[in-house]
Amino acid sequence: MVLVNIARNPVPAGAVSGHFRGYDGVKLRFARWQSTSEKRNGTVCVFTGRSEFIEKYFEVISDLRMRGFAVTIMDWRGQGGSHRELRNPRKGHINSFSEYQKDVHCYMREVVLPDCPPPYFTLAHSMGAQIMIHMLTSQSSWFERAVLVSPMFHLMPTLLPLSQGTITYLTEILSFLGVGEYYVPSGRDETWDEQPFEGNIITSDKTRYKRAQAILEIAPELGLGSPTIGWLRAACRSMAKLEKVEFPTQIQVPTLIIGAGADRIVLTRFAEDFSLRLKIGSHVTIPGAQHEIMQERDELRLQFWAAFDAYIPGGRDLPLKETSMV
């Protein structure tokens, strides 16, 4: 699938896009760009959240390129322009988060290492951040530094009717009974970005929210509905590993965690406590920001970019007034 180009969200110039093969041979979509600055600071690998797609990050990609970074991004299996796991393409399904991690190995080997300049940094959001944190425990990680935004380390209690431990137990039983590919209760084909702006729990920026909706109006095949019971089981299994006291001490890569002060999807406090146990890392919370910080209002995005620039070598000397493309 080619990148979707609309007037409100044009494809950044110089895009190279295509597909690579996941760990089991399925086709997964990627795109990459060179820096638009005279500076050459390496490559930022962007990893998106659940239900997101490459086109939603065009503004972020342009911001990074102005800072002197080449940028590469992929669509996770089961979403965006990548292979869908089930007959109903709107169901968000995975059997294990280790599948995402194995796909990242293929992506780095086939797309990033051959064609993107080092050093490598990662910018990961929500589910992508949760996948990345496991990969950052390896001493052979490709990344010099990592920035994890609104990481999906622990879901908000208000998002689930039961405790995360109880949810884990129930999804294990239901998956064993063969209904893992069913939607979670009240699940539906409609994605968050297709719902009215009023009352949404991902961003307070109406313009950027409507921009994502405009993309899906042109290319509804990029949309993803609710997760399945199997996806929720896999997510809970993966998040449970982060609750072990020793896990943060195993992170081998300097890591900045950026939390959203008004997040109603993931528990920012858990990420804050997690960051305190990192041997090489830090944490910043942006007050008033909702879950999708990079899709937030300009004044909140400026705080995000200030934190990014202070942590990732190379971008910090760009004037803050140049950080927004909208």
Image: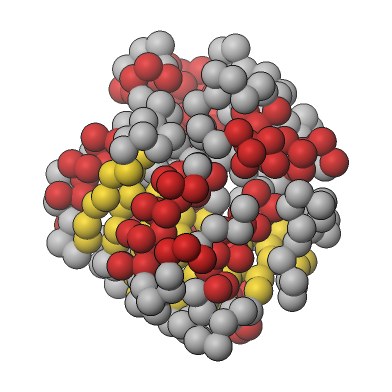
Q: Quadrant of residue 314?
A: bottom left
Q: Quadrant of residue 252?
A: bottom left
Identify the coloring. Answer: secondary structure
In the displayed structure image, the side of residue 286 where residue 128 appears, left or right: right
* Camera-side residue of 132 and 73: 73
Q: Is residue 47 above or below residue 293?
A: below
| Residue 222 percent location from the top left of the image | 75, 42
Q: How many marks?
A: 0
Q: Residue furthest front?
A: 321
* Camera-side residue of 99 and 111: 111
Q: Is residue 169 above or below residue 277?
A: above
| Residue 289 percent location from the top left of the image | 40, 37
Query: Residue, x 62% and y 41% (percent of image)?
Result: 208
Q: Is residue 119 visible?
A: yes
| Residue 96 percent location from the top left of the image | 50, 42
* Camera-side residue of 127 and 304: 304
Query: Residue, x 43% and y 73% (percent of image)?
Result: 318
Query: Residue, x 70% and y 28% (percent of image)?
Result: 194
Q: Is residue 238 visible?
A: no
In the displayed structure image, the side of residue 73 where residue 260 appears, left or right: left
Query: Residue, x 43% and y 70% (percent of image)?
Result: 319
Q: Which quarter of the rendering shows the N terminus? A: bottom right
In the displayed structure image, the side of residue 116 where residue 217 appears, left or right: right
* Camera-side residue of 37 and 299: 299
